[in-house]
Image (cartoon, rainbow, N blue to C red):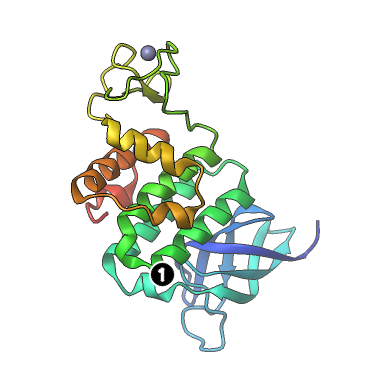
């Protein structure tokens, strides 16, 4: 294995490691999610600054004996400092990172592109935070291959009527018609929400975030998407439980 590795990545998590070091979780395009030790990051001013949400080119050293990665240098593309300066934005960013850590399954390049874009959008248009959150989950379900078309029930094939409310089946893990729904009655999509998700499914992330929703619809779809995210994530999402999203 190459000892010196260069890869695009984003810091998902950072914690103190020993006296003066930090241990990072980095989503990298080339290696998936890796644990990286950043030596001296706590104290030295010369140490490489690799804070959570930082997106850039990582220069890593792999120690085949210890089996770990060390951060040699980082050339940032976007530091996303603005996200860390606001509590709601911070929690939204941390929610994205937590989901990626929990569902990561090998689509590293796609996950990287999605997260990179989501963090850029949070930085550029913080006032659209809820729409970015909705679209992040919507797009992630596509990356994970679990998104279903919202024009018919995937369980029984019944085409939805224009005004039909769509429910959720925890058996198939997807939207479904009322007859196929089981106990997850809290997860439901009114017709307007279904139209919005269908309309924005094929748009770019930027375009989709530009589509306006009224306050009520925004809150309903957001609640649905958060419930959906918790459904497809193994284990409780701590950032979701915080109530700050
Ligand atoms: Zn059905």
127 vs 181: above or below: below
54 shown above or below 198: below
> Residue at the location (27% across, 63% down)?
88
Location of the C terminus by quadrant is: bottom left
Q: Secondary structure at mark 1?
A: helix
Compare residues 114 and 189 and report the one nearer the observer. 189
- Image x and y of residue 155, in percent: 43, 14
Image quadrant where residue 73 sits? bottom right
- Residue 108 in sight: yes
Front residue of 110 and 91: 110
User: Taking 243 as reference, is 76 left or right?
Assistant: right
> Percent x, y for residue 234?
42, 36
Residue denoted by label 1: 123
Residue 233 appears in view: no
Q: Is residue 63 above or below residue 167?
A: below
From the image, which quarter does the N terminus lie in? Answer: bottom right
Which residue is at a point 32% across and 42% down the rendered structure image? 226
Residue at the image point whose x is 51% and y is 42% from the top:
202
18 or 33, which is in the foreground?
A: 33
Residue 136 image point, x, y percent: 43, 49
For disc 1, the neighbor class at 10 Å (few under 14, some 14 to 19, many from 20) is many
């Amino acid at each position: 294995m190459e000892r010196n590795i260069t890869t695009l990545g984003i810091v998902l998590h950072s914690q103190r490691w020993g006296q003066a070091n930090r241990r990072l979780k980095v989503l990298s395009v080339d290696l998936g999610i890796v644990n990286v030790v950043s030596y001296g990051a706590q104290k030295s001013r010369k140490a490489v600054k690799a804070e959570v949400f930082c997106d850039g080119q990582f220069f890593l050293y792999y120690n085949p004996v210890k089996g770990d990665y060390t951060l040699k240098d980082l050339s940032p593309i976007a530091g996303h400092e603005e996200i860390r300066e606001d509590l709601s934005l911070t929690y939204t960013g941390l929610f994205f990172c937590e989901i990626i850590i929990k569902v990561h399954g090998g689509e590293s390049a796609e996950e990287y592109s999605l997260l990179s874009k989501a963090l850029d959008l949070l930085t550029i248009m913080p006032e659209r935070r809820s729409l970015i959150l909705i679209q992040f989950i919507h797009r992630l379900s596509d990356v994970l291959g679990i998104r279903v078309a919202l024009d018919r029930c995937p369980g029984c094939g019944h085409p939805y009527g224009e005004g039909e409310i769509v429910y959720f089946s925890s058996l198939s893990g997807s939207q479904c018609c009322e007859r196929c729904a089981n106990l997850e009655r809290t997860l439901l999509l009114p017709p307007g929400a279904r139209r919005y998700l269908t309309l924005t499914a094929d748009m770019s992330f930027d375009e989709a975030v530009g589509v306006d929703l009224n306050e009520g619809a925004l809150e309903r779809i957001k609640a649905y998407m958060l419930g959906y995210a918790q459904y497809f994530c193994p284990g409780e999402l701590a950032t979701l439980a915080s109530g700050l999203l």
